[in-house]
Amino acid sequence: MGRRVMVVLAAMLVGLIGVAAVLLYARGADARAVADQQVQTVFVAQERVPAGTAAADAVAKGLMVPTKIAAKGVPAGALTTVDPAHGKLVALSDIAQGDFVLASRFGPNPTGQKALQVPDGQVAISVSLSDPGRVGTFVTPGSRIVIYDTYVPAAAAKGGTSGAKETRVLLDDVLVIAVGSTSLAPVANVDGQAQASAGGAQLVTVALPPSTAAKLVHGIQTGTLYAGLRGTDTSSSSGQIVSDSTLFNK
């Protein structure tokens, strides 16, 4: 009789332990579910935050705004508050619109300084041009230029007549965004000197759509480029070809 009682008590004890374990697991699962449903405030870039912008200024200008999201979606290291100490730190690089702002994106000084602002959707390409090839010193940031290409046509190259060259308009209307180290948004160079290549040539940097930029890069590699300063309402014929044999034709 006593043995049966002991067996029953042992079974009840095991059952109670099992029930307690289930209750504890359920309580933990509930706690985790509640934690996942909680929201946390993080900063999101509403607009592009340029490198060098102080965190406090970015908030004041609405470049980055506090946003509440589910706690489980908060990325590691997300910026959750901008206190007076952190507000003095500056963006180490550009922060793209829509990005979560990480605390590590800010520091005492920017790691680099963007000296050139490239228009959205375009590519900056630098061309080395001599003084005559860039209209002396009259081509400046903001100028519109036409670029000519003098090259050896494929037929002449195959025939071995390398001296036969042609010249035509490569690009009719190009925006200059920098000459040497002087850009549309000037930034002081380290040594304060313009960047020039050997032989007195000067770097002229232009902005182009990617497909057109490929044409310019090819022209740089295969021909000799010359620039002209465009006047108002100037239109150049991209189909006109001038060669040694047609140079004096009307």
Image: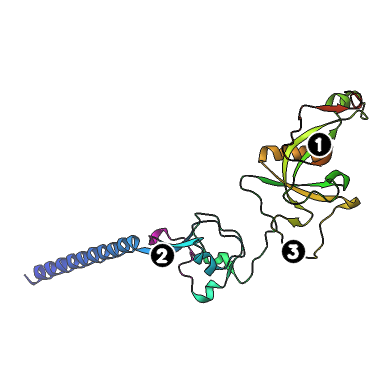
Q: Residue at x 55, y 66 (%)?
A: 104
For discs 2 and 1, the disc positioned in front in the rendered view: 1
Q: Residue 3, percent across and down? A: 11, 70
Q: Earlier in the sequence, mark 2 or mark 1?
A: 2
Distance of label 3 from label 1 (alpha carbons): 31 Å
Magenta region: which residues?
68-82
Residue 214: mark in rendering: none
Query: In which quadrant of the rendered view does residue 188 lie?
Result: bottom right
Distance of label 3 from label 2 (alpha carbons): 39 Å
Look at mark 3 in the image and give the residue it sits on.
188
Q: Tell which residue pokes out farthest to the left in this image.
A: 1
In-front residue for pair 211/8: 211
Look at mark 2 in the image and give the residue it sits on.
41
Disc 1 element = strand
Residue 148: mark in rendering: 1
Does 107 sit left or right of 151 as displayed?
left
Crowd band around label 2 with a 10 angstrom C-alpha radius: few (<14), some (14–19), many (20+): some
Q: Residue at x 77, y 35 (%)?
A: 170
Does 16 sit left or right of 91 as displayed?
left
Under mark 1, the amino acid is: Tyr
